[in-house]
Image (cartoon, helix red, strand yellow):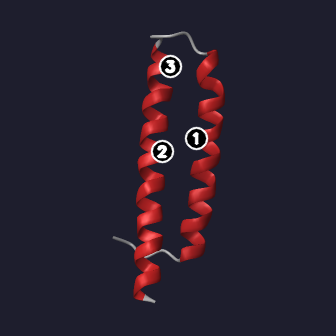
Amino acid sequence: MAAYTNEELAEALRAIESTIAKCEKTLPKLREGSPQQTLTVRRIKALKIAVNLIEREMEGSQCKG
């Protein structure tokens, strides 16, 4: 896996969290059970997993340094 600086990880984290917020804002406007609603729910879940992985990587790099 490529090595990233904490600054790069922090910037990626901000971008992903912004995207999550935008998706969560649009979610109530989507019709229940529609493909768009399903896609948005899955996208939010995937982005939250990405946030968790980035945070774990940032914590791990702090322990090493």
Separation of marks 3 and 2 at Cα, in angstroms: 15 Å
| Amino acid type, callout 3 | Gln
Q: For this rendering, which residue is in front, 59 or 46?
A: 59
Q: Are marks 2 and 1 in contact (CB under 8 Å)?
A: yes
Q: Residue at x 57, y 50 (%)?
A: 16
For label 1, count other residues whose C-alpha is less than 10 Å away and answer few (under 14), some (14-19) or many (20+): some
Residue 45 versus residue 53 in the image, above or below: above
For label 3, count other residues whose C-alpha is less than 10 Å away and answer few (under 14), some (14-19) or many (20+): some
Q: Residue at x 42, y 83 (%)?
A: 63
- Judging by the rendered image, the residue that carries numbered circle 3 is 37
> Which image quadrant: the N terminus?
bottom left
Residue 21 versus residue 11 in the image, above or below: above
Q: How many callouts does the rendering have?
A: 3
Separation of marks 2 and 1 at Cα, in angstroms: 7 Å
Q: Which mark is residue 31?
A: none
* Quarter of the rendering containing residue 10: bottom right
| Amino acid type, callout 2 | Leu
* Quarter of the rendering containing residue 38: top left
| Amino acid type, callout 1 | Ile
Q: Are marks 3 and 1 in contact (CB under 8 Å)?
A: no
- Judging by the rendered image, the residue that carries numbered circle 1 is 20
Going from N to C along the chain, the mark reached first, 3 or 2, is: 3
* Quarter of the rendering containing residue 53: bottom left
Q: Are marks 3 and 2 in contact (CB under 8 Å)?
A: no
x%, y% of residue 52?
Answer: 43, 55
Q: Residue at x 42, y 31 (%)?
A: 42
Q: Residue at x 60, y 31 (%)?
A: 24
For label 2, count other residues whose C-alpha is less than 10 Å away and answer few (under 14), some (14-19) or many (20+): some
Going from N to C along the chain, the mark reached first, 3 or 1, is: 1
- Judging by the rendered image, the residue that carries numbered circle 2 is 47
